[in-house]
Image (tube, rainbow, N blue to C red):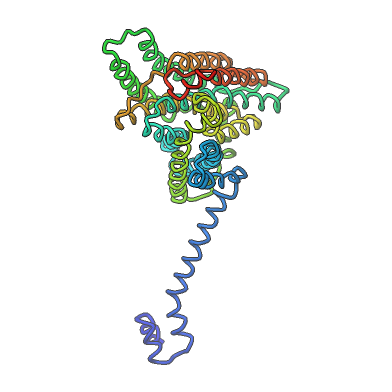
Amino acid sequence: MGEFEDESLVSPSSLTRKNFSVEGPSHSSSLPGSTQKFCYSNMKNRVFRSIKIVVFSAKINCLMPFGPLAIVVSNLSGHHGWVFLLSLLGIIPLAERLGYATEQLACYTGATVGGLLNATFGNATELIISIYALRRGMIRVVQQSLLGSILSNMLLVLGCAFFAGGVVVSKREQVFNKAAATVNSGLLLMAVMGLLFPAVLRSTHTELHSGKSELALSRFSSGIMLVAYAAYLVFQLKSDKNLYLPVDEAVTDENYDDDDEEAPEISMWESITWLSILTIWISVLSEYLVNAIEGASVAMNIPVAFISVILLPIVGNAAEHAGAIMFAMKDKLDISLGVAIGSSTQISMFGIPFCVVIGWIMGCPMDLNFQLFETATLFITVIVVAFMLQDGTSNYLKGLMLILCYLIVAASFFVHIDPASVEDKPRKHRG
């Protein structure tokens, strides 16, 4: 018996030579193949399960075919209006799934790295579109799309969240963390300051070096804004975590950990893979979208300013819009506020300065002079929203007021002739 065990440990061929059993050699020799087949089957099942969760679990993904359709239409007909609309529809589910993949990855990285991931990928769609527009020298499209993203988050997204939450929870006022909202409002006012001075400097013709001082000031201010945003992240994630606890969880935050923390649905490497795939696909569609903007403006007789400030941001914020409303209806207004105001803070203090730095690297003179009309619109919006948030409560009337303010802004940009946009000047003569 000892001899049998020794020889069978050495090699399966010893069993064949001694003819102990017919099943012995066939069973032993088939082990490696069985293991490989099992591993392959397991990997295939994981891939199918990951695709099912990411691609087929959300109803909004029914818009995904519009992306390839936009590429087909662009190559066959070149009709800029259709390419623009199809690209817009195709990017909506990709932006939502990108946010989902980021949340899944944040489950494995912890709060600090997760916060940085959300800061990086939370507005990735807008940043990717902006970088492609910068490559084409379309500085005004970049400025107006980023501005429009801030305006839509602060007025439309937050307004719809307040309104929906106020209608569902109609018997009382909803409450949120006033301290966190105040910090975000302060950062937004700082961003307005960064945008205001270059615009005033140009408008008053008081530059020390004409054409250079404005750009130098913009780059310096962008560096300061990035430092301020980094300090804000440290403050939010490390220094004073209790400040950002929801008002109804401030005392019993152990319940928050047990009830609200969800287990990830996909693995860490699956999250990273999906982030890469979605980012590349958004980049491809963004190129078609940016290339079609000017042609779509002419084909649909819509000003480039309206497309950049209103249409592009609504698409980029579609997922955030739906999420903020859903959380408000569940009476989790702090999460809705984090989505709407937090996203505006990211774009104003990180997205805009980041694009200035990227433009500097590309040799593109991207600056913080958003023109007086756009800067004044942002300034008034920040003031209105800050007043709405100052008492830490919300209701459907506040939401309705914010939505109506957004309609006024949208109408203003529809009739606005951008003096810096060459594309709008022929429209002025036709009118």
Question: Which is nearer the eye, 267 or 64?
Answer: 64
Quadrant location of residue 219?
A: top left
Quadrant location of residue 290?
A: top left
Quick one: which residue is furthest to the left in this view?
Answer: 209
Residue 50 horizontal/vertical position (percent): 52, 53
Question: Which is nearer the eye, 8 or 28?
Answer: 28
The quadrant of the rendering that contains the N terminus is bottom left
Exactly how many numbered labels are in the figure?
0
Residue 140 horizontal/vertical position (percent): 42, 24
Q: Is residue 365 left or right of residue 267?
A: left
Q: From this viewpoint, is residue 239 visible?
A: no
The quadrant of the rendering that contains the C terminus is top right
Residue 342 horizontal/vertical position (percent): 49, 27
Asked if residue 203 is positioned above or below residue 252 in the image, the reply reads above
Q: Is residue 214 left or right of residue 250?
A: left
Q: Is residue 214 left or right of residue 56?
A: left
Question: Which is nearer the eye, 337 or 300?
Answer: 300
Quick one: which residue is furthest to the front in this view?
Answer: 430
Q: Residue at x 61, y 23 (%)?
A: 159
Residue 42 horizontal/vertical position (percent): 50, 63
Q: Residue at x 57, y 53 (%)?
A: 52
Q: From this viewpoint, is residue 314 visible?
A: yes
Asked if residue 264 is positioned above or below residue 39 in the image, the reply reads above
